[in-house]
Image (cartoon, rainbow, N blue to C red):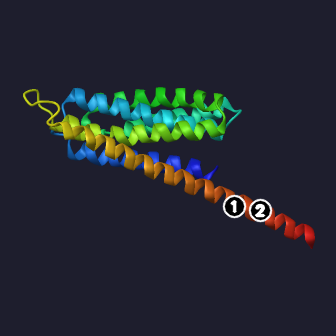
Amino acid sequence: MSMHSLFVLFSLSGAVIVSSVISWKLKHQLGHSEGMAITMLLGMLIGLAGGTAFGSIFQGNLYASTLYSILFGAVAGTAVAPSLGLMAILEGFAGGLMGGMMGAMLGEMISPVESIKLVNILLALTFCSLLLFAVLSSRSDKEAFIPSKGWFMKPFITFLLISGVLIGGTQAAKYMDHKKAYEQVEKRQEEHNH
């Protein structure tokens, strides 16, 4: 398993933990529909990103990648917002299961280089979707949905920051993989010379 795959799975696990904590803190401010929508969206995105990563890891073995992806997506979707009720848990489970299944097929069909790019896009969407907790918990039907024109800059800046972190993590993973490969080549040359 490459460093990028570990980075992806660690990031997705972090998204699950963060969303669980946020949903627990905002459980009284979110309605049932909002909770179900957020849980389904996050379950689907996490399952899709994880499934694409597993499809790339187990390239050529669709059965294994689908099995691991469905398991990862369903568990992640269930754990996204357990405090929002049974319907939200079921939505997250179903969304994660479907996303994992689709992600495994997608990861199987594309090259590993394309997979890295697509997983990074899905990671950025996953982390940006966490902003829905704040947007939907503070919204009431009487208030204007968009308080000011400057409000549009907050999601854009957040998206840029998250994208920067993901690009940095990807570059660090590539560096670690290349360094590891270089050390293995040096070790083989050293053994060959002796």
- Secondary structure beneath dot 1 equals helix
* Residue at the left extreme, as displayed: 142
10 Å crowding of disc 1: few (<14), some (14-19), many (20+): few
Instruction: Name which residue lies at 37% across and 43% down.
Output: 159
In the picture of the structure, the residue carrying the numbered disc 1 is: 180
Which residue type carries mark 1?
A: Lys
Q: Nearer the viewer, residue 16 or 93?
A: 16
Image marks 2 and 1: residues in contact by CB distance under 8 Å: yes
Asked whether, in this view, residue 152 is left or right of residue 184, the answer is left
How many callouts does the rendering have? 2
x, y percentage for residue 175? 62, 58
The image quadrant that residue 183 belongs to is bottom right
> How far apart, in angstroms, are the residues tagged by discs 2 and 1?
6 Å
The image quadrant that residue 94 belongs to is top left
The circle drawn on residue 184 is: 2
Quadrant containing the C terminus is bottom right
